[in-house]
Image (spheres, helix red, strand yellow):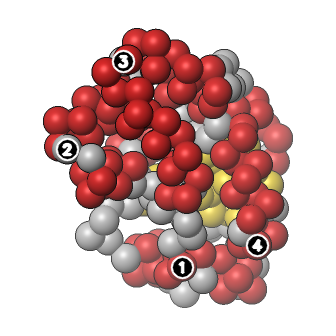
Amino acid sequence: MIKNIVFDLGRVLLEWEPYQYMLENFPKHVADEMNEKIFESRDFWLMDRGLMNEDQLWQKKMEELPHLKEYILHMKEAVPKLLRPIEKNTRLLPKLKEKGFRLYVLSNFSEKHFDMVWKKFDFFKYFDGMVISSHVKLAKPEKEIFLELMRRYELKPEESVFIDDKLENIETARALNFRVIHLTDQMDLEEELRKILKF
């Protein structure tokens, strides 16, 4: 019996499409290089993990990629504006809460940007608990951050559904016995939840 629903944030409850934004605003070769060397880089993951802050990340990238400095400065300003609620998904939260499910967040997120979205968007009030990577210095797809969620909220994976857009995170959750929804652009979250929760 499912009692808990665990949500990732980016591309599940919050829009997060920096590559798309760069394609629309920069030459394609710039968007490609920045996506690979910044947004898909290990450094970005380390920032999410709380081992580097935003300012350190952007400074390091300007030093490594001096030919992209103006674009990097542009993205430093643009990133907060790219994080907007995915309304059709956030609207599900009060409905799920009314049906008695406990709701949690398990997300890789840098400290500064998480603080910003948490203060800005009121859908966070529906959650019973959150584990944010930069707060605990652990990050998905590592098993340890899932164990932290389970320990902190006495959460049993077999009673829980985990929703994420990244396959490697889904695989970790599945290995720990969570029911999973690997959310892709083509999927409707409400429909997928109905299949599992039968509501």
What secondary structure is found at the residue carrying circle 4?
helix
Q: Which residue is mark 3?
A: 65
Q: Nearer the viewer, residue 60 or 5?
A: 60
Which of marks 1 and 2 precedes in the sequence? Answer: 2
Q: Amino acid at mark 4?
A: Asp
Give the number of the disc on residue 27.
2
Look at discs 3 and 1 and give the one toward the viewer: 3
* Quarter placement of the N terminus: bottom right
Quick check: 61 left or right of 27?
A: right
In the rendered view, tell whether residue 71 sits above or below residue 114.
above
The amino acid beneath tag 3 is: Leu
The answer, for residue 162, to whether it is visible in the render is no
| Neighbour tally class for label 3: few under 14, some 14-19, many 20 plus, Cα within 10 Å | some
Q: Which element type, helix, strand or loop, lies under badge 2? A: loop
Marks 1 and 3: in contact by CB < 8 Å? no
Between circles 4 and 2, the one closer to the viewer is 2
The earlier-in-sequence mark between 3 and 1 is 3
Q: Where does the image place residue 75, in percent across and percent down from the top left?
A: 46, 42
Measured Cα–Cα span from mark 3 to mark 1:
36 Å
Spatial CA distance of label 4 from label 1 is 12 Å
Mark 3 vs mark 4, foreground winner is 3
Q: CA distance from mark 2 to mark 1?
A: 30 Å
Q: Residue at x 60, y 27 (%)?
A: 47
The Cα–Cα distance between marks 4 and 2, rounded to whole angstroms, is 36 Å
Label placed on residue 122: 4
Disc 2 versus disc 1: nearer the observer? 2
Q: Amino acid at mark 1?
A: Glu
User: 120 above or below 60?
Assistant: below
Q: CA distance from mark 3 to mark 2?
A: 16 Å
* Residue 80 appears in the picture as rendered: yes
Q: Is residue 134 left or right of residue 65?
A: right
Up/down of 20 relative to 172, above or below: below
